[in-house]
Image (cartoon, rainbow, N blue to C red):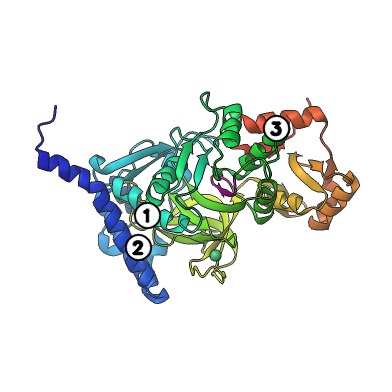
Amino acid sequence: MNVISTDAKLDALKQVPQYKLQAISRLEKLLAMSGEEKRREIERKLAEQLKYAFRNSEYYRQHFGEAGITSEEQLSPDRFRDLPFITKADIRNAYPWKLLAGSMADVGRYAESTGTTGTPTSAYFSRNDWLENNVFVGYRLLDMFTPDDVVVIAAPYELSIPAQDLERIFEMIGPTTIACGVLNEVCNWDRLLHIIEHVKPTALVCSATRALLIAETAVQMGLDPVKDLSIRKILNIGETANQPKSKKISEVWGAEVYNAYGMTESCAMGISCKHGHIHLIQERYYFEVIDPVTKQPLPQGEVGELVITSLSNQSMPLIRYRTNDLVCISESGCPCGDRAPILEHYGRIGEEIRFEKEQVAISYPKLEEKILKCESYDKFFKVELDAESFEIIADLKPGYTIDQFRDEMKEQLPLSIHHRFTARTFTPYERARLLDGLKNSLKPFGKLFSQRTVQA
Ligand SMILES: [Zn+2]
């Protein structure tokens, strides 16, 4: 047993509120800054983070050393773009603790990726990192949630970050949370729907595909999500949600829809405003967009790979981390008044239909967006593809024919690949199987696209 004085114990308990107050005071200063002052502050934090990583992380000293950077002086911001990237593979190879900077005693959170796209990777945050993130995200979520809200969190808890992150934030800003999780025995689909029907929550946090799936399950149980259920706010996390998908979710639930962007390694990096734009949280990360092939920076407004650098991470600094996410970042002209740049997420690199001969590549989220834009399309779809062609199997609204859907899709697809595309509707068995598969998946979006099995 520890021998520790009463004063020391009380001081230990005061640490968390003190960290929070420090983060709030930093936020307050940033909010009072002009655009130019903020840009300079971000540059200062960037320089500080590079030096911190060099001083406190064996991993980064070695990593920079391999690129010929052997002293702190060589880490000046004007040479930032000479710094080598780190990739998902580097993070995987550093599993579990090689990226640790500073003291293990400072680490407050440890998480792992789901491993749906390979071997898991680890991520860790100091209490300071974690609480600062809570404060910066909480400030934004206050635009959406009030203490009167009762929020169902139907996102993974085990080993994960977003659900726990949001819980801590909700604790600060007031709503009641109900931790339902996903894919667990205690709160299965029946229990989740029972809670939504009887406890009467006002808000739902889950991935976009799951939001549609929960509504569809309610319909199959004879409930009308708009008339019979009370959810009027939905925050989508963990998956790309384009505008037509947000609109669809809004319609089926009769709810306002918001989106958050982030990853296990980073916590949240962007939150959407009431106009549906995801504004970047520039106070915690420095964002670059590069051409994934040449690795050269792209001008603002072009689609490329997102590269992030943390500005104040203590336990796991991320320096020029290639996220493997395709994005477009543009200046904010948003009527909400937030000057932070706007991010559009186009999915993960490699998750696309690609026909080399026609030089056409369409990311899965972009293809989904095209499907959802069709007037004839109703609720769920599945894309089956192989090297030569792709087929969209889709629900249609009553009164529409598959020919109408096919024509609407063709209008949106490049002419050169029309011969590679077919469309049809589900058989009842196929549709039931798809919904079952989605319900049993941690990341249902990926299940909407599948490679056709090649017949031997
Ligand atoms: Zn906005």
Name the residue type under label 1: Val
Amino acid at the residue labelled 3: Leu
Residue 83: image quadrant is: bottom left
Q: Which quadrant is home to the N terminus?
A: top left
Q: Is mark 1 within 8 Å of ligand 1?
A: no
Q: CA distance from mark 1 to mark 3?
A: 37 Å
Please tell me which residue is depicted at 54% across the width and 37% down the height of the picture. 154
Quarter-wise, where is residue 298 in the image?
bottom right
Q: Nearer the viewer, residue 433 or 91?
A: 433
* Tag in front: 1 or 3: 1
Q: Position of residue 380 (x, y in %)?
A: 74, 41
Q: Is residue 306 above or below residue 5?
A: below
Q: Which residue in the protein does label 3 denote?
A: 435
Q: Kindly indicate whether the residue at mark 1 contacts the one at mark 2 (C-beta within 8 angstroms).
A: yes
Q: Identify the residue position indicated by label 1 in the image.
A: 135
Q: Read off the magenta span.
A: 231-239
Q: Which residue is mark 2?
A: 27
Is 318 placed above or below 381 here? Answer: below
Q: Position of residue 322 (x, y in %)?
A: 48, 52
Q: Visible in this render: residue 18? A: yes
Dot 1 or dot 3: first in sequence order is 1
Question: Dividing the image into 4 quarters, which one contains the C terminus?
Answer: top right
Mark 2 secondary-structure assignment: helix
Instruction: Report the amino acid beneath label 2.
Output: Leu
| x and y, in percent, of residue 152 in the image | 52, 40
Q: Residues within 10 Å of mark 1 (few under 14, many from 20)?
A: many
Q: In the image, is 423 to the left or to the right of 116?
A: right
Instruction: Indicate which disc, 2 or 3, sits on the residue closer to the N terminus.
Output: 2
